[in-house]
Amino acid sequence: MADILSKLSEQLKSQKPFAVYAKPGSTTLIGVFQDDDSENTVKDFSEAGFVFAPFQNGKIVHIPYKNSQVHVNDLEVKTVGISHLGLPPVNENAKADFEALVIKSVAEIKKDNFQKLVTSRTEFVEARKSITEIFSTLLQLYPNAFRYCFYSPSTGLWMGATPEQLLQTEGDTLKTVALAGTQVYDAEKEAVWGEKEKQEQQFVTDYIVSILKNVTRNSNISAPYTFRAGNIVHLKTDISASFGNTTLQNIIMALHPTPAVCGLPKYEARDFIVHNEGYNREYYSGFLGELNHDFKTGHPTTDLFVNLRSMKLWEGRAQLFIGCGITKDSDPEKEFFETVNKSMTMRRVL
Ligand SMILES: C=C(O[C@@H]1C=C(C(=O)O)C=C[C@H]1O)C(=O)O
């Protein structure tokens, strides 16, 4: 593990693209270090390597496996409990701005322009620890998430611990999930879900199933269940299907951005977000991961995740990105505090 982390620092200094990551539940740390500082982009998703894609416009950066060194190490597992860091003081301006955005979103939904919208905000916080220290803590704290650190000259340095799979393929089978609905994790009580969360998550499931029906065969859908992601829990449904006569590109483009991070109807929701959020999401709520190449086994599989619970880092500073699903029943203040709770995933490691 130490050699991957020192290679990460070296690579960052020489400004060459890299991805270091651990899959959910895995104790294997994979480092993909590009040999030079060129920047490659995805053209049609037939490429093999590690991809990093934005929410909407922008480069889909790609580290080709043929042009990189791969290091695979065991993750040294230390038991680190989730520290009980208190919530940060409320920034009244940020709260008022976000609540105004939620109020506007709810009004649009009530006018029947949307079924659901996912609104987000960004926050800059101090990051005093070194990059490798921050990343080591993230790796230890969220064993069930896809944990990553990615750098390329145009995207900058990103890190995250995302609970959400976008797409996994193996042979003729593909898997995805519908993830939505949020509450704070309580070790003492089983989560009980209200109608608002159930409906919000059902929108996501229905949409994913309906679009997959057009491009795949034989879909299987689980019942929704509670899924823990650090200090919070979500409602999750597992969905699988067989590839029909379609390409990986068609499936990825049909899924992304899902209503879990964008809204319904999809393209109108995306335009609403771009025009109303007041900042650029960049790579937050985009997707990332292995494209047509498993870096551990060498198999030609795809394993992509939605870029949530993520942040962009500079020397001494981090930009956090946090959002939540809005439906007609959303309460603006509650939604704001949901973003604060989600921001704790990143704050705890800084
Ligand atoms: C948008 C985010 O998370 C998404 C929104 C959720 C919700 O609204 O309940 C839950 C999980 C994610 O699909 C985020 O973490 O920034």
Image: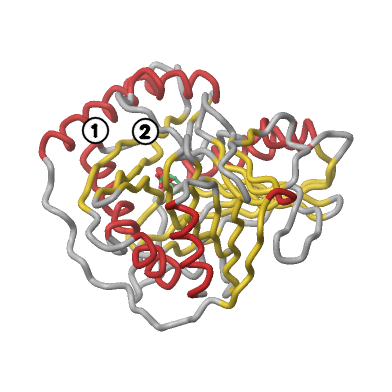
Confirm or reject: label 2 Cβ below 8 Å from ligand 1: no
Residue 240 visible within the image: no
**Amino acid at circle 2:** Thr
Q: Quadrant of the C terminus?
A: bottom left
The answer to whether 261 appears left or right of 317 in the picture is right
Name the image quarter holding residue 9: bottom left
x and y percentages locating residue 48 in the rendered image: 74, 46
In front of the other: 6 or 143: 6
Do labels 1 and 2 touch, CB within 8 Å? yes
The residue that mark 1 highlights is 98
Q: CA distance from mark 1 to mark 2?
A: 8 Å
> Residue 174, relative to residue 20: is it above or below?
above
> Residue 52, relative to residue 108: is it above or below?
below
In front of the other: 304 or 267: 304
- At 52% from the left and 24% from the top, the residue drawn is 57
The answer to whether 243 appears left or right of 139 in the picture is right
Name the image quarter holding residue 170: bottom right
In front of the other: 333 or 256: 256
Please report whichever mark, 1 or 2, sits nearer to the chain's N-terminal start: 1
- At 78% from the left and 47% from the top, the residue drawn is 241
**Amino acid at circle 1:** Phe
The answer to whether 336 appears left or right of 33 in the picture is left
- At 34% from the left and 25% from the top, the residue drawn is 105
The answer to whether 243 appears left or right of 163 in the picture is right
Name the image quarter holding residue 287: top right
x and y percentages locating residue 339 in the rendered image: 30, 46
Going by the picture, which residue comes out furthest to the right? 245
Q: How many marks?
A: 2
**Crowd band around label 2 with a 10 angstrom C-alpha radius: few (<14), some (14–19), many (20+):** many
The residue that mark 2 highlights is 119
x and y percentages locating residue 335 in the rendered image: 28, 42
